[in-house]
Structures are given as structure tokens and as C-alpha cells.
Image (cartoon, rainbow, N blue to C red):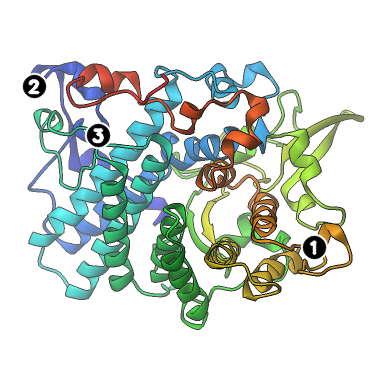
Amino acid sequence: MKNTKIWIAAGAFVMLTAGSCNSDFLDLAPISQQNSNNFYKTAEDMGNALTAVYGSLQYSGQYFSSMHVMGDLRSDNTEITNPNAGADLQAIDNFTNTPVTSISNTTWTGHYQGIQAANIVIEKIEGVAMDATLKARYVGEAKFLRALMYFNLVRIYGDVPLVTKVINNPQEGYEYGRTGTGDVFQQIIADLVDAEASLPYTYPSAEAGRATKGAAMSLLGKVYLTRKEWALAAQKLKQVIDEAAQTKYTLMPTYASIFGVTAENNAESIFEVQFKSGSSGEGSPFTNQFAPIGSGTAVVAVGNPLGQNIPTAEMNLAYEEGDLRKESSMNTSYVLNGKTTEHNYVVKYSGTPAANLDSDNNWIVLRYADVLLMYAEALNELGFEADGPAFDYLNQIRTRAGLPAKSFSNEDPTLQIATQSEFRLAVEQERRVELAFEGHRWFDLVRTDRALDVLADKGIQPHHLLLAIPQSQVDINPAMISQNPGY
């Protein structure tokens, strides 16, 4: 699947020209591509179309760049320490971004291009004669991916246009305004329920990276948690845990064994975006993006160190003494030409790129440790129980990290959790260090209503909880697309 990325984009889509419509409207991502209705005739055609949906996750506006910028740089985990890393990234980091900050448009466009590709699979496959089980699976995969993309959009922008059919011409786009988050979430939930029903637990190793039943269940649990539907979240996340024999999910024996190109799609991984270096632009940029500017070849041997997503001093101090996760997550210095320079940087995505921005490292979207911590959180929200099951799941994560367990009546006050609110903070802390630099921190802080307090020193204001709608979208269709308040 990696090596067939989105060649279909050229064959299946025809870019509309200014002669066929208002050229400004081309800025609308889901509207800017017209599909050839004669293209989708065979199961192979639909397989290629589905590959295009997976390929969209590699876009700059999705997991190539935007999602770690949104998930980490906007939080207290990482920062921009060198202005040469990019003015737009600095704006995201310090909450001075505006509706014309380019990453807002890139993120919007990248996701809606992927949604259009998913809608093509879901709609066009109906008329294709093919094996019924395979057809249902393809639809399930497309619905999982569409749900993931809408989940990202609704968490980033709030109300967004809900497009669930193929847009065949630009004029159709004018019909779509912003849909309320509640309705968008209902579509996400419906897609994931359908995906869970039609997807298999596992695939042959040659098809690693496809969406599974466990991925649909895990994402649905996260959706319920985001909506504060604690009982539903606990039920779905417990299902993931209880069905481990079928899903094959388990914690890897060591934290270090989760990451690196030789560990991709391991037993802890639930869903990850596939990247492949040296293969027509399908490589990942993280090794270069996260290396400090000025580090030469000390941190990354090939390509340019770009100084993005640099761990903050607070992040460095967030690890408890003896936490085995730190050395696999970040470093605090590098040696170049015999000189040691103190500088934080991420090491989870280390490796040697084939070329600049061309590494093998995948991006993990969901993993089993995340599920265990989410389940602990949901149980606590349903009712605090001293040394109850929620403690067990929290401590599974701590034990692997080489840390002592936390308990209700621990003699060590730093290991004592005596109330529901203290357990909330314990989960927040554990998620911060366990999932560091994997794009979760910002969304966790917003989801738990903690962002304004935790990020007060960064100058955050209430309206910053949502990103600005790209000004180009407002300008193109002002009757239907309004700007988020505060921008």
C-alpha cells in the first residue's frame, strides 16, 4: 500500500480551471476536484481509490505537518526556539495566529481533500460488481478515515461543513455552510459504528497499516471521551481491552521498543500513518523537522535540521526521576565538532533520511497505552474508587516506565491519589509523558477544560481554543461560512 500512494489522484480527479468557474472558488478543497464518473468500474479501481484516501493522511495539512503542530506546538510540550523555523509556526506557538496564517488553510484543505477522496470510495463503490465482503470492508475503511479526518477538523475549528457526498462541480460547494459540532460528531460516530461492524480484527502483514475493527473501536472511545460521554467511552474502551485476544493489542515490553522504523505497526500500535522513504515523495519529515537548527549532522545526518517542535524546559522537567520514557522521547544536548550544545530535541522519530524530509518513520495516531489511559480516565469520571480498577490501568503504564505505582493511601505524598480531582491530574500527567510528541497534548488540555489554566503564561485567550477559519473560505462564501469569534 505504501508504494501506491495516490497515483490515482491524477487519473481520477480533474482539476477545474478558471474557465469553468470562479477561479477563487478553487481554494475550497472539497470542491476543487471533479471525479471522472467512468473511472470506477472494478474492484481494482476501488482499491486504488481507497489507497488515495490513505495517501491523503500524508498531506502537509494532515499528518505530514499539521497534526503535530496542532497537537504539540500549540501546547506546553513544544515550542519554536529559533525564528528561522518559520513565522507561521511561531504564530501558532504563541497564539498570535490570524485567519490568514497559512497553516490554517493548509490544514483545512488537506483534510477536505481527504474527505472528498473518502466520499468517492463510499459513493462510487455502490455500482461496482465485486465481492460483497471486500466491498463492505472498503466502505468501512473509508468511513473510518473520514471519521478520523472530521474528528480532527471539529476539534481544531469547531463547526465545519459536513460533506458526505462527492462534490462534482464547484457550484455545489456554495450549498455548504458550517455544520454544528453536535451533528458533525453524530456523523463521526455513525461512521465509526459502521466501520467497526465491517472491518476485520487483523490483516496479513503485507497489508499492515489498514484500519481495523480495533482502530474503529478505539477512535470511537476517544470520540465519546471528548464528548464527556463517560459511560459510552468506558464501555467502548473496555471492549478494546476485552477483545485483545482478537485484536492482538498489548503493551510492548519496553517503551523504547515502540518507536523506530524497525518497530512500525507493532503489537501496541492500533493505527499509524504509513510513510516510506525513497518512494516518490512518500517519506516522512519528522527526523528533519524536529532536529535543532544549527545542529549540522549531529542530530540528523541527511537533510536540513529545521528546529520545529522543540521540547520546552517544562516538558524536560515533567519526567519523574527514573522515568525510562524520557531517553526514548527527547534529548537535551548534542555534540557537533567536539562541542556540546545544550538544546532540547525530540528523538522518537530519529533515523537517517534517504533525503531531506524523506524518512521511513510512521506517525502513530492511536496505540494501546492511549486506550488504557483513556479507560482509566473514563472510570474515574464515572466515580472515584480508592485503589479501584482505574488505578490498575494507570499503573500498568507507570510500571513499564520503571516508576512506582500510585495508590490511595501511599506514604509517599507524590505517589498518593486521594480524590477524583487528583486522579484527573495524575492521568493528565501520565498522558503528557507517555504520549509526548505524538500530537495529543493540546487536544487533551482542551478536552479536559484545562487549556486556559495550563497555558495562561503563553497568552492564550478563550477564543484560541479554536483555530481561525481560513480567511479564504470566509471570503469565497461569506453567506455560508462565518469566522470563529475572536478572530
The circle drawn on residue 178 is 3
Closer to us: 78 or 305: 78
Image coordinates of residue 64 in percent, x first then y, are 48, 39
- Where does label 2 land, which residue? 20
Quadrant (top left/top right/bottom left/bottom right) for the N terminus: bottom left
- Is residue 148 placed above or below 69 in the rendered structure? below
Quadrant (top left/top right/bottom left/bottom right) for the C terminus: top left
- Is residue 2 placed above or below 105 in the rendered structure? below
Image coordinates of residue 217 in percent, x first then y, are 41, 67
The circle drawn on residue 156 is none
Report, in whole angstroms, how far the alpha carbon at label 2 lies from the one at label 3. 25 Å
Horizontally, residue 337 falls left or right of residue 176, namely right
Looking at marks 2 and 3 on the same chain, the residue that comes earlier in the sequence is marked by 2
Image coordinates of residue 440 in percent, x first then y, are 56, 47
Q: Residue at x 41, y 56 (%)?
A: 223
Mark 3 surroundings: few (<14), some (14-19) or many (≥20) residues within 10 A: some
Mark in front: 2 vs 3: 3
Q: Can residue 37 be spotted in the picture? A: yes
> What's under tag 2, amino acid-wise?
Ser
Q: Can residue 206 be spotted in the picture? A: no
> What's under tag 3, amino acid-wise?
Arg
Q: Residue at x 46, y 27 (%)?
A: 463
- Is residue 264 placed above or below 36 in the rendered structure? below
Label 3 element class: loop
Q: Residue at x 64, y 70 (%)?
A: 393
Closer to us: 163 or 428: 428
- Where does label 1 land, which residue? 416
> What's under tag 1, amino acid-wise?
Gln
Report, in whole angstroms, how far the alpha carbon at label 2 lies from the one at label 1. 66 Å
Mark 1 surroundings: few (<14), some (14-19) or many (≥20) residues within 10 A: some
Q: Residue at x 46, y 45 (%)?
A: 279
Looking at marks 1 and 3 on the same chain, the residue that comes earlier in the sequence is marked by 3
